Image: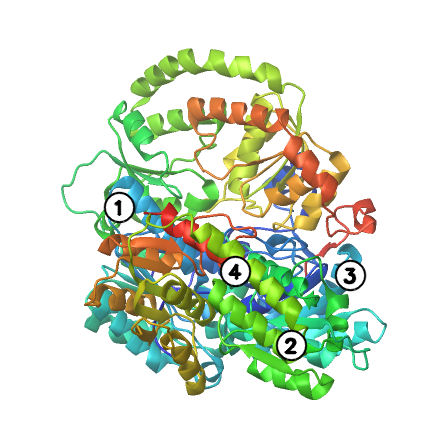
Amino acid sequence: MAINLSNSNVGTRENRIGSITGYVGTLKDLAGQSECGTLKGCSRCFSQSSTCLSSCGLSQLAAIRDVAIIHHGPAGCSVSASSAYYMAKVMAKKRGVTSDTVYVGTDMNENDTIFGSTATLKEVILEVNKRYSPKAIFVSSACATGIIGEDIDSIVEEVRDKVGVPIVAVHCEGFKSRIWATGFDIADHAVLQEIVQPPREGVKTNKINFKNFFESARPEIIEMFKNFDLDPVFLYCNSSIEELSHLSESIATTCICGTLGNYLGNALEEKYGVPYVRSINQCGIKGFETWLREIGKVTNRSDKIEKYIEEQRAIYIPQIEEVKKELKGLTAVLGMGPGYTFEVSRVLDELGIKVVWALAWHYDKKYENGDVPPSMKYLLDNDIDFEASVADQQNYEVMNILNKYQPDMYLSRHPGSTVWAIKNGTPAVYVADEYMIFGYKHTLEFAKTIVDAIKNRSFEENLAKRTKLPYTDWWYKQNVDAFLEEAI
Amino acid sequence: MSDIMENPKGGCVLAGINSVLGALDRVCPVYHSGPGCCMQTTAADQGQSGHKNSCFVASVSIPSSNMLEKEVVFGGTDKLRTTIQGAIDIIDADAYFVLTGCTAGIIGDDIVSVTNEFSSKGIPVYPIDTPGFAGDSTLGYEIVWNNFIDQVIEEGVEKDDKLVNIFGIIPYHDTFWSGTLEEIDRVLSKLGLKVNTFFTKHQGIETIKKCSAAALNIIINPWLFKGPSEKFEQKFGVPSLRIPGLFVGATDTTVFVRKVAEALGLDKALVDKVIAEEEDYVYNYLAQAIGVVSWKRFAVVADANNAVGFTRYLANDYSFTPVLVIVSEPIFRPQDKERIIERINDLEYATPPKVLFLTDQYEINKAIREEKEEITLLVGSSNEREIALEKDIQFITGAFPVNERLIFNRTYAGYKGSLTFTEDIYDNL
């Protein structure tokens, strides 16, 4: 890929890497088609709510310490503020650092949509800079801002000298992409444009960039990496601007989720030669080992890593084997972002659970470097197949599948998705924490969580008995692809 | 653009509309908007309202046309048409309401023509053509009722002199809405009234259609619902009684009961009996807890309705000393501000507190931080917890947004709610 950091706009995932949001078929067909380049996504003539790329992009940036996010749009768009604010404070407190990050909206109203409001935006930027003295300022657009053609780039240029800290325009028009993960790329692009500096002369480091969401397993991963003489830099939650400015000096970049880390990893490799660790992710046994070995290869630490793997296997593998006895033959449906769906499918297979249907909210048929995502490649190479769809978080499609297949469990990583499964009487595991299946230890815990969830299902059964779901009987009898149509 | 808004409490008008529709049983909103508007607006109100979400359809299950660049350029009515048809096919609802995001509003999609295609066939599809940038969540509440008055509520329904409609408590945007409406319902039912809360008891579109039968519209809010109440009276001849602020505790709830009784000419003996029972219930408990809490000097940060209720209860019924009251929702009309100040200042014995109208979190925090008089109790939203910690003030979460606890039917309003409120003062010493 060619990453153009001189332009504040970043191409959408659809345009850059051919991502799709509509498909129904099998995993093998999906992977096969993406490998030979014939995959074409479908659109829907009926859809339920998707998600805004701005909440993905701006909540990433708002997690950075001591910065200001200025959301130039109607008040409704600034609402990620609440969760961003809350999470940032909670995570900073947990780690024992302080963050004075602030998230403000410009409260665009009807008049502004007619007459424009760039002059006021300029004043807002200067006032925010004065009030909060942030270490960097991100100025974002919204749908309304984009449609009326507010030129936030020019405003940023006009105030750049006056504010005296890094300031960057972030283009977050929600209508731009049907793939909200484009927001992750937008955040990366902004950081790469204005925050990351070229490596300093003669700086030697053992730092490895680790892109994740909420660094909940931070102490544990720091401990683990000490065995390999590596020092992880967690991004972006609680990152400081100073830390981010030196990302180009690290000896490698890795991430917890390919969807989240792909753009930054590839860009750092392309621009500064920092290798990006490309492997299946750390979920499950095979995933953890493959990922560690790849890090070993990239950073020249294979001996240490093999030693660690051997020690840990001795502790955990017998325990995991024990729990597996209780999971054998169970069936699962899962619905997650593509960075997890095809990784978690692999783990379920490892644990002896049969995946009857996997839904990915979107699907990147290749990554920035042109490869098929490693998680898909692994499943193909190991002859694992199941029914699969690309479902843009469409709840009606999930419910149709759950109703038809009546699996033993539904797994999802998105708030609001599991509750509908529970109302359907299906035990659900909310894989909320990104580290829930990380490495041997958490794979063991994950397996135990599944046992707990499916063994005691009285709440699900009682609730389902008394709850009427909104869907018509007609819909449950339809094929899940009833509303898909060829994309134009 | 007004100015800088750090952490707005609530969302755009679309968020308010969605909250109201989401609280009605078997009603399905259909968004004609960008892909993110539904989740953002759900997050704005329901997502910050004590972790309770709409039961019928919510967030990921709400139909949305998810407008993209193509629709922005070429118009989105075709996509809207198939989205409405799909919603009718798969969602078994009693009514569908089409809402517009900023995008649809700016490009000028004619949603009324599209909904007419369905309503002319007898399918209950209604347009609410108010884009997100038109205002905030509270406006959304009025917009919905204006649309109900124009499009849904029937004329010529036979009058029922025992039926009352309750307005002014916004679902989700007031975190305690369920419990508050249930307490109002409980008290008024004891007086022999039939109560339309609209958002509890599985009331839905049928209740709304027939609500013109009511003998009285009771507005429990110091400023909201002015326009719709006038329109309601004009079209259906139902008069309004405004209770200028939520009632918390025996004193104000009794005043509320007497006002309703007077407006409807209820039997005095029954009213006196109900009041006596309720007051006895409350004071019997209060009498069992004397001496546990030392007197407090308090501040309140809340929407106008709750700010009035909390201040008056703590100052009048509980003899605490009011210091500072911050009304944290946008209030535009000067006469509304005056009415709110008057309610907060008209106290039995206490010296009136300082009253400020601030919506920007930076200014709210600054006002509390710089207050010269001592404050030992702060009742506010989750957003004020931080400043309470900073100043080491006892804190109670009593107003929207509420992030740190699950709230089903809890309320601080009415007779019973005031006991819960008092319990919470003791709970968090």
Q: Residue furthest left?
A: A202
State the image quarter where residue A420 is shown: top right
Q: Where is mark 2, residue-wise?
A: B217
Residue B88 is tagged as: 3
The spot of residue A154 in percent (x, y) is: 33, 75
Q: Where is mark 1, residue-wise?
A: A248
Question: Badge 4 local density, few (<14 within 10 Å), some, or many (20+)?
Answer: some
Q: Secondary structure at mark 3?
A: helix
Q: Are marks 2 and 3 in contact (CB under 8 Å)?
A: no
Alpha-carbon distance for marks 1 and 4?
70 Å
Alpha-carbon distance for marks 4 and 2?
25 Å
The first of marks 4 and 3 along the sequence is 3
Residue B279 is tagged as: 4
User: Which of pointers 4 and 2 indicates the residue nearer the eye?
Assistant: 4
Q: Residue furthest bottom?
A: B234
Residue A378 is tagged as: none
